[in-house]
Amino acid sequence: MSSIKRIIRTDNSDVTSKIFGSYDKYLKRIESEFDVRITNKSTEGAYGDSIVIDGEDTNCDAAYKCISYVKRIATLNENVTDQNVDYAISMVKDGQFDDLSEFGEDCLCITSKGKPVRAKTVGQKKYADAIKKNTVVLGIGPAGTGKTYLAVTMAVKALRAHEVSRIILTRPAVEAGERLGFLPGDLQSKIDPYLRPLYDALYDMLGFENCQKLMEKGVIEIAPLAYMRGRTLDDSFIILDEAQNTTPEQMKMFLTRLGNGSKAVVTGDLTQTDLPGDAKSGLAQAVRILEGIDDISIFQLTDRDVVRHRLVQKIIAAYDKYASRSKNVNAKKMSAKRKTEQEGKR
């Protein structure tokens, strides 16, 4: 292969600095992944404020695509993170840069501090698009993929645009593998710990005081799932969080609350079910039952869409690998047991 040189002009030292990262850590990461040499104007003054990539043509093109994506993030005045760089590298290596190049710059909503909220991965963008286009969306994926936060973001956007008149947030009050006993305080104090992630997302989007006022007026309602029974929810944006912890009966009850002018988003992670014993997950059943129904989207986020610490992605992948290995071992044991039983009958 021939050696070539690609140039990405930034015309802005701040953008260049974000792309390179502190102590050039992003530069070194991209150089290592694609076996190229990357410099800027400090060593290639003839090119002005630019990023210069040297290497074999295929590697150079891959690094160019990766840096182009990171540049877009930096140009939007966003802080470039390890997750941004790792995501770009994985997408380019898997030949999915076409998806990456279509990755929108659309602002989904503005937080209470004036910060624009944008999808951070292609999967997140498609998830947000699915919420826009469908009346019911089942958003399924591992921890850290932004399922709940993006759902709340879209709910606040719809409220501000007067598409709905209220937001209703709910989740089943199931303890995550612990037994907390009797919690002190009134009913609201008892259920608040289960609903904390929903509060956090709302406070980020609307601010604490504004959110409190809207809750006092009944524009925003946060309640455990049991409180939904018997209601018809018109002109509302309804979010059911941690839906993997619903029973099939609870899931059916929730989905049939949908009224005129309403939209529902159901979020959950099927790998983190906290239901007791052999109880079946209502979310897992709903995925099978509702597939193919018009105006209902079943959207799957993956570990690639994780936007928390870079280790979270590796932790999820490790657990998935362990679960798959355990499943294979158990299948072999069951097969051997059946074979032994059959031989015993002969």
Image (spheres, rainbow, N blue to C red):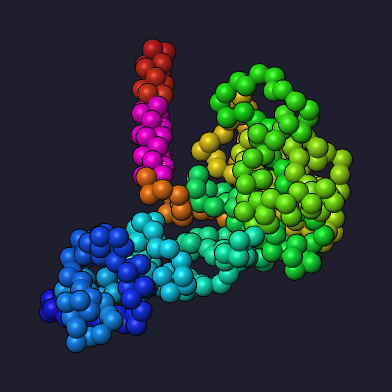
Q: Position of residue 90 (x, y in %)?
A: 34, 60
- Residue 313 placed where, x, y %? 40, 47
Query: Can residue 84 be seen in the rendering of this structure?
Result: yes
- Kindly identify the residue that appears in the image at 19 percent across and 87 percent down: 46
Residue 15, by quadrant, is bottom left
Q: Position of residue 127 (x, y in %)?
A: 57, 60
Residue at image position (70%, 59%) is 156
- Side of 42 relative to 305 (left or right): left
Location of the N terminus (image quadrant): bottom left
Identity of the residue drawn at 53% across and 63% down: 119
Answer left or right for 259 relative to 300.
right
Count of all numbered marks drawn on residues in the image: 0
Q: Is the magenta stretch mostly helix, strand or loop?
A: helix
The verdict on residue 34 being magenta is no
Quadrant position of residue 204: bottom right
Q: Which portion, as a residue range, is magenta?
A: 312-332
Residue sitting farthest toward the bottom: 46
In which quadrant is the C terminus drawn?
Answer: top left
Q: Position of residue 246 (x, y in %)?
A: 67, 36
**Residue 323 covered by magenta stretch:** yes
Q: Which residue is drawn at 79% across and 67% down?
A: 162
Give residue 210's quadrant in the image. bottom right
Along the line of sight, which residue is nearer the eye, 17 or 324? 17
Q: Is residue 216 left or right of residue 316?
A: right
Q: 26 or 92: nearer the eye?
A: 26
Q: Is residue 258 visible?
A: no
